[in-house]
Amino acid sequence: MSDNNSFSGMRLSEIAEHLGAKLMGDGDRHITGMATLKKADAQQLSFLANPKYARDMLTTQAGAVIVSEAMSVKCPVATLVLADPYWGYARASRLFDRNPVKTQTGVHPSARVSDLAVIHPSASVGANAVIESGVHIGLRSVIGAGCVVGDRVRIGNDCLLYPHVTLYHDVEIGDNVIIQSGAVIGSDGFGFAPYQSRWEKIAQLGSVRIGHRVEIGANTTIDRGALDDTVIGNDVIIDNLVQIAHNVVIGDGTAIAGTSAVAGSTIIGRYCIIAGGVGIAGHLEIADHVHIRGMSMVSKSLKQAGSYSSGTGGAVETSVWQKNAVNFRRLSQMQNRLSVLETVLKKNGQPKTDQVSALDD
Amino acid sequence: MSDNNSFSGMRLSEIAEHLGAKLMGDGDRHITGMATLKKADAQQLSFLANPKYARDMLTTQAGAVIVSEAMSVKCPVATLVLADPYWGYARASRLFDRNPVKTQTGVHPSARVSDLAVIHPSASVGANAVIESGVHIGLRSVIGAGCVVGDRVRIGNDCLLYPHVTLYHDVEIGDNVIIQSGAVIGSDGFGFAPYQSRWEKIAQLGSVRIGHRVEIGANTTIDRGALDDTVIGNDVIIDNLVQIAHNVVIGDGTAIAGTSAVAGSTIIGRYCIIAGGVGIAGHLEIADHVHIRGMSMVSKSLKQAGSYSSGTGGAVETSVWQKNAVNFRRLSQMQNRLSVLETVLKKNGQPKTDQVSALDD
Amino acid sequence: MSDNNSFSGMRLSEIAEHLGAKLMGDGDRHITGMATLKKADAQQLSFLANPKYARDMLTTQAGAVIVSEAMSVKCPVATLVLADPYWGYARASRLFDRNPVKTQTGVHPSARVSDLAVIHPSASVGANAVIESGVHIGLRSVIGAGCVVGDRVRIGNDCLLYPHVTLYHDVEIGDNVIIQSGAVIGSDGFGFAPYQSRWEKIAQLGSVRIGHRVEIGANTTIDRGALDDTVIGNDVIIDNLVQIAHNVVIGDGTAIAGTSAVAGSTIIGRYCIIAGGVGIAGHLEIADHVHIRGMSMVSKSLKQAGSYSSGTGGAVETSVWQKNAVNFRRLSQMQNRLSVLETVLKKNGQPKTDQVSALDD
C-alpha cells in the first residue's frame, strides 16, 4: 500500500541541491509537486525550457521555476537556475512521483515463485505474479502484479516491471530497466519455412538481451532470436505498441516512438531517432545518428547519418488530395509526355542548347 | 457461471416495445437470436439498413425483420418498423448477448482486493484480479478475471472491464465504460530529456481521465499525462491497438479506428472520425467534425471540419506502382523541366498570354 | 520446472533419420544445438539455404551442415543432404527447443478451473490461469500461466497458449495452434450505430473460429463477429500486433506480418502474403495468392493473384524527399500545365500527329 497522502513535500533548497541548481529565493519554501507555468500554485515547482512559453513565466504563480540564467532575471518568483532547464525538469519530476508500484515491497503471498528462483531480499514481487524456475532478480527490482517471468530469466538491479509484463524463458535484462504493462519480451520470432502448402515452424532458439537504462513501452513486443539473440543496447527507449522482430540489434541511445516496427535481422545504429509509425524492412543496416521521420517506410539500408522520409507529407483536404493522388498514378505517363514535348522542341530547334542542358539538372 | 442454455428468447411484442418499433405480424413469436437476412431462421430476428441487401429480404426466412416503413411493405415476414433500422439492430442486438462476463457476480475468492478499496456490493471482481489500495468501484461494474486496478483508481457505475485490463494508479473512469482485454490505461508517457548521451526520464505525474459511455479496444494503450492529465471525453469510441500518447485530449463523440496513433499533447475535437492506421503528430489541434481517412499522416493542425487524406491512394499492381513511385522521386526535376518548357515557349511567343495565365490556376 | 540442463543432445544419425536426410559423415557425433555457419561449434548443427552464405560454409566449424546435394561437395564437415535445406533447418530446429512452457504438465494448483470445464488429463494449465465454465481442452494442449479462457471455449489437441493469452467466450480453436502472449481472441468488434450524437453499441453476437496449425503473434487482436463468426483458416500464420476486425475471413495458408490490420468483413483468399504494416479496408475481397507489399494501403478488392503496392517507396534523405513531396501537392497543377503545353504545340502544328498519339500511351 502506498502512503502518498503523508508526502509533505521537499524544501526548495533540498531540490536545488538535488539538481545542482543555483537557488534564487526562499530555500525554506515547501514544494509538493510540479505543474506548468500556467497552472502551478505556490506549492508547485515549474520550469521554462521552450522560449514559446516565456510569456507564461511573467505571470506564473508557481512556488519556483527551473530556468536558464538568461531567462531567470524575468522570473517573478524564486528560481532554480540551470544550464539545461528541461533536464532539470526531468530530474526534479522524479522527486514528486506518486507511483505506488515503486514502493511495493516483499513477495506478495499470492505470487507463485519457483523454489529454484533467486530473488534478492530487497526486490519485490506483486500479487499473482508468476516467477518460474531458475530466474534471478537483482537488488531493489520490482516485479508488478500479474507479471509472468519465464524460466531462467535474469533481471538486474533497480528494474521496474509494471503489471502484466510477460518475459519468456531465458530473457536477460540489465539494470535500471523499466518495462510498461502488457509488453511481451521473448515471444517467438515469425520464422517459418514454406513446405507443401504449409508453414514449417522454425523453433526460435535465441533469446532477447536488453541492456541497462532501457525503457520499453506498453504492449510493445520484442521477439526472441531464431539462432542468435535479439539485442537491445543500453539507454534505448522504446514507446508503446512497437514491434521488434527476431534478431534485430538496436544500438545504444536509440529512441523508437509508438507503433513503429522493425523487421527481422535489421541492425540499427546508436543514437538514432525513429519517429512514430515507422516501418523498417528486414536485413537492413541503419547507421548511427539516423533520424527517420514519422510514418516513413525504410526499405534499403541507410548508411549515412541524417534525416530520412517517405510518403506524400501531411494530410490535406481530401478533395485536393484526390486530384493529386489520381495523378500519382499517371506519373509515369506524365514523364513520357514531358519527354515527348522536350524532344519535339529540340527537333524544332527549341529550346536552345543551353536550355536543354538545364533539363538535366 | 453463465446460464445461457436456459435462455428461451423473447416474444416479438416485447422486442417491439423495447425498441419503440411498430410491430407488423405475430407478437407471440419467440425470438432467440439475431442473424443476417440470408442466414436467419424462424427463431431469429434480422434487419435491413443498407439498400444493397434489399433483395435478401425478399426471400428471408427470419422470424422478423427490423426495417424502415418504406421497405417494410416488401417484407415477406413479420416486421419491426423503425425510422432508423440500423440503430434498431444495435439496440436489439444487446438483448441476445450471451456474454457471460456481464453476468459475473461478487468478488471471486482468488481476487486480491486491498482492504482499503471500496467496491460497491453490486459490483463484481473476477478470478485473480488485483485491486489496489484506495480504489473505488461503482454500482454494477464488472472487473474481469486477471485485471489489475492500481492505487486510487476510480471506476464509475455500469462499467465492464474484460479480463487482463491494466489500469495504472490514479486513473479515473466514468460510467458505462467498456474496456476490452489487454488495454493499458495510465502507462507512462514517452517523456525523456536528452542529457549526455543518455535519456533522463521525466516522471509522468499526470493521470488519465475517461468520460462516460466510452469504449476502449483490445490492447489499446493510453498514456498518463506528464503534468496535466490525458483526457478522453464522453461517448468516445476507440478500437484495438490504438496508441494515445500523454496529454492528448479527445473530444466528445469522436471515434478512432484500429492501429491509429495520436502523439503527445494533441487536442482532437468532438465528433471526429479517425479511420484505421492514421498517425497524428504531437502538439496539434484537430477541429470538431474532422474526418481523417485511413492510413493518413497528420502533421499540421486541421482547423476546419472536413475530410483529410494523405498518401498515394490504394495499392495497385506492383509493376504499375513501381513506374509511378520511381517518378515520385523525379517530381522536383519534372517540375523544373515543365518550367523550362514553359519559359522556352513563352520566349518564342508561344503560348499566347491567355494560355500562360491558365498555367497559374 | 524444465530439465534442460540434462539435455545431452542427439546423435547425428538420429537427426538424419528424423529429417529423412542423407548423412555424409560420422553419425555418432552428438549434437546439442543449432547455430549459424559462422558461429556453430563442433556440437552444433548448421545449415546452408541462401547461396549468399556459401562462403561461410567453407570455413565452418559446425558439427554438421544441412545442405543441398549440389552444395554438399564443398562442405568441409559432415552433411545432412536434403532437397530443401531451409525446411530441414526448420524441422531440425524444433529438436533443440529449450522452451519450458511446452514441458509444463498437469493443472497448477493456483489455476482457477471451473468444475464445468473439461480438460483432457494429458493437457496442462499454468499458474494463475483461469478456465471458465463449459471449456473443452484437448489432448496435450498447454495453457500458459495467467491465461484467461472464457466460457464454452473449445481448444483442440496439441495447442500451445503462451502466458497471458485471453480467449473470450465461445471462441473455437483447432489442433496444433500456437498463440503467443498477450494475444486477445474474441474481443468485441468495433460496431456502433450513430444515434443522437452518441454511439449505440452493437452487441457482437458472433465468435471467432480458428483452424488447425495456426500461429498467432504476441499482442495480436482478433475480434469476434457481429452476427456471423470471424474465421481464420488452416495453416494461417499471423505475426505480432496485428489487428483482425470482426467478420474477417482469412483463407488457408495465408501469412500476415507484424502491425498489419484488416478491417471488418474483408475476405482474404488462400496463400496470400501480407507484409508488415499493411492496412486493408473493410468489405473487400482479396483473391488467392495475392502478395501485398509492406505498408501498403488496400482500399479496393484485389481480384487477381499478384503483387500489389502503394506509397512512395522507401525513405530517402529528407531534404531530397521534401522537394518531391512538395511537388506531389502540385501534381494536378502539373498535369494541367502539361496539357496546356501539349495544346499549344498542337495548335502550332507541333508536334506532328504521330507524336501526339505517343502522348496517349
Image (cartoon, coloured by chain):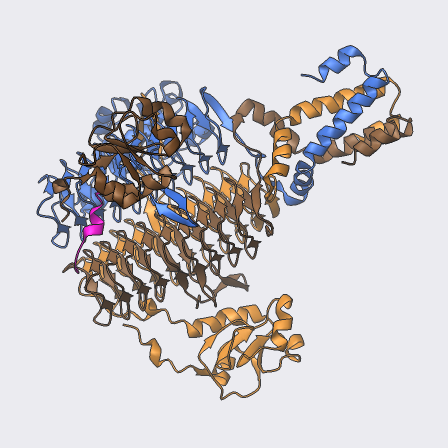
Chain colours: A orange, B brown, C blue
Would residue C336 appear left or right of B34 to someone viewing this image? right
- Picture quarter containing residue B58? top left
Image height of C198 relative to A213, above or below: above
Res. B16 visible in picture:
yes
Residue C49, quarter of picture: top left
Residue A304 appears in the picture as rendered: no
Which quadrant of the figure contains the N terminus of chain A? bottom left
Which residue range is magenta in the image? B96-107
Q: Residue at x 35, y 44 (%)?
A: A224
Is A78 on the left-hand or right-hand side of C189? right
Quarter in which the C terminus of chain A is drawn: top right
Q: Residue at coordinates 41% horizontally, 59% vertically from top-left?
A: A212
Q: Is residue B111 above or below residue B351?
A: below
Image height of A165 relative to B87, above or below: below
Whole-percent x, y for residue A182 in the image: 34, 53
- Count numbered badges in the picture: 0
- Compare residues A149 and B21 and report the one nearer the observer: B21
**Front residue (pair C196, C275):** C196
Residue A25, above or below C201? below
| Residue B315 image point, x, y percent | 52, 29
